[in-house]
Image: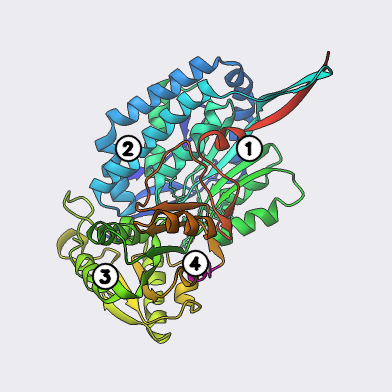
Amino acid sequence: MQIIKNYVNGQLLDPFAGQYIDNVEPATGQVYSKIPNSDEHDLEQAVVAAEHAQKDWANTSVEKRAAILCRLADIIDANADMLAEAEAIDNGKPITLAKNVDIYRASANIRFFAQAITQFSSESHAMEDVAINYTLRDPIGVVGCISPWNLPLYLFTWKIAPALASGNAVIAKPSEITPMTAFLFSKLCIEAGLPDGVLNILHGTGPSIGGPLTTHPKIKALSFTGGTATGAQITKVTAGMFKKLSLELGGKNPTLVFADCDFEDTVNNVVRAAFSNQGQICLCGSRIYIERPIYEKFKLAFVEKVQQIKIGDPLQTDTQHGALVSKAHMEKVLSYIELAQEEGGTILTGGNQVTLEGRCENGFFVEPTVIEGLTNHCRTNQEEIFGPVCTIMPFDTDDEAIILANGTEYGLASSVWTNDLKRAHRVAKEIEAGIVWINCWLLRDLRTPFGGVKSSGVGREGGLEALRFFTEAKNVCVKY
Ligand SMILES: NC(=O)C1=CN([C@@H]2O[C@H](COP(=O)(O)OP(=O)(O)OC[C@H]3O[C@@H](n4cnc5c(N)ncnc54)[C@H](O)[C@@H]3O)[C@@H](O)[C@H]2O)C=CC1
Ligand SMILES: O=C(O)/C=C/C=C(\O)C(=O)O
């Protein structure tokens, strides 16, 4: 059984208290590794190491920092098969998805921010004949990054890469539900020659290490991705501590399908948007609104396509739909399917747990599920299910579609499917969300601002926004 270790000051360490928790493979339901349940002592050691390393790292030339990070990205690429298999085992996601999306993006994140920092510049403001102001952007110091289980290495690297590139030392906590690729990554950091203490990875649960990390006085900025309730808790416990916070939280994202869309392409992509990664992406489109003239036709084609999704062992390369991340999460998703029926919904396809034969007979599999006949304000359409469950509903006018789309507390992402350019722009402007995709979904340009409004988060990451978040601006005013 593999024993995962913390990565502190360049070394792979056991937790001080010797406490471990079980790591379960979702596709089999079996414990297959042990995870340190780190606590304040481990954190203190990491903070000391990070503080010690940070000044040298900040004083290391941008070119050298970028070169080390690019080397790390290359090493990820060289180990892509190994990492993809580890991610599929740890998370339950299909191995093909793990390789093409998760691991591909992990190295892209690191390479992107390694290059971005070499292009980062700051503003100057001239006061005619009086003075010139220029802005310095210094690293913050020691920062914290907390990431979730749904896109483990993808989101872990999305946070640490800009933090490191801009000269901070990082204490990162991956999800205790999917710790494996962050552990493997720590070995790759050693191989890449990342200086000791610049990145420290502490494993463990929210209460044992996540909480202490958020309130540690020496950690001046926190980037968090996860559930909205946890984001609210972090805001509460850090109130009055004057930390910079970037919170990427939940979504309940609308997909708006207009009658003039490219029908086939839209059906294919709306299926992908609803069910990729078993619906466990905060950007998934789980509320699908279809313009009435094509409602019945779209429904038939959509359900037919969903029924073709191949459910199977995540380690088989032809599997399209793997296991949910945990038993608890599977039970949560199944309880929402039950709730949807109590609320008057009709299941058009799916709705059940799936029992596979062989090695995966005890895995946490749930069918891709499509429900119709619900109102917009029912709990099924208001609460984040974060699983392979979507609802479909008709609409009659653009204005109605916008009201329905905006009718939840969330505001992360949305997609709009139409060939009417004016409509696309108008709807995009009216939708309350951090991201609107027109005739596409999850098409990501890493330079763009990424984040949500309303209960979907605070702040933006991506591109310059992330580099700005992980630096402090200082204005210098020079009188002529
Ligand atoms: N990106 C997203 O939008 C995500 C949303 N979720 C939603 O949240 C629900 C709960 O999933 P969880 O895994 O429990 O998410 P979570 O928000 O509890 O976990 C995310 C990360 O935060 C850490 N954490 C938990 N409590 C903490 C605390 N008090 N202080 C600091 N860190 C803490 C976790 O250990 C993990 O690393 C899911 O069912 C889903 O609806 C979950 C993961 C990602
Ligand atoms: O940055 C991206 O491309 C995707 C981000 C996804 C999440 O934050 C999520 O699913 O939690």
Q: Which of pointers 3 and 1 lies earlier in the amino acid sequence?
A: 1
Dot in front, 3 or 1:
3
| Residue 256: quadrant of the picture | bottom left
Asked if residue 284 is among those painted magenta in the image, a careful observer would answer no
> Vertical placement of 100 versus 29: above or below?
above
Cα distance, mark 1 to mark 4?
49 Å
> Vertical placement of 209 versus 197: above or below?
below
How would you rate the neighbour count of disc 2 (Cα within 10 Å): few for under 14, some for 14-19, many for 20 or more? some
Q: Which of pointers 3 and 2 lies earlier in the amino acid sequence?
A: 2
The stretch of residues the image draws in magenta is 402-408
Label for residue 104?
2
How would you rate the neighbour count of disc 4 (Cα within 10 Å): few for under 14, some for 14-19, many for 20 or more? many
Cα distance, mark 2 to mark 1?
33 Å
Q: Which of pointers 4 and 2 lies earlier in the amino acid sequence?
A: 2
- The reply to whether discs 4 and 2 touch (Cβ–Cβ < 8 Å) is no
Tag 4: residue type? Answer: Ile
At horizontal 52% and vertical 42% (from top left) the residue drawn is 449
Q: Which residue is mark 4?
A: 402
> Vertical placement of 470 versus 55: above or below?
below
At horizontal 34% and vertical 43% (from top left) the residue drawn is 102
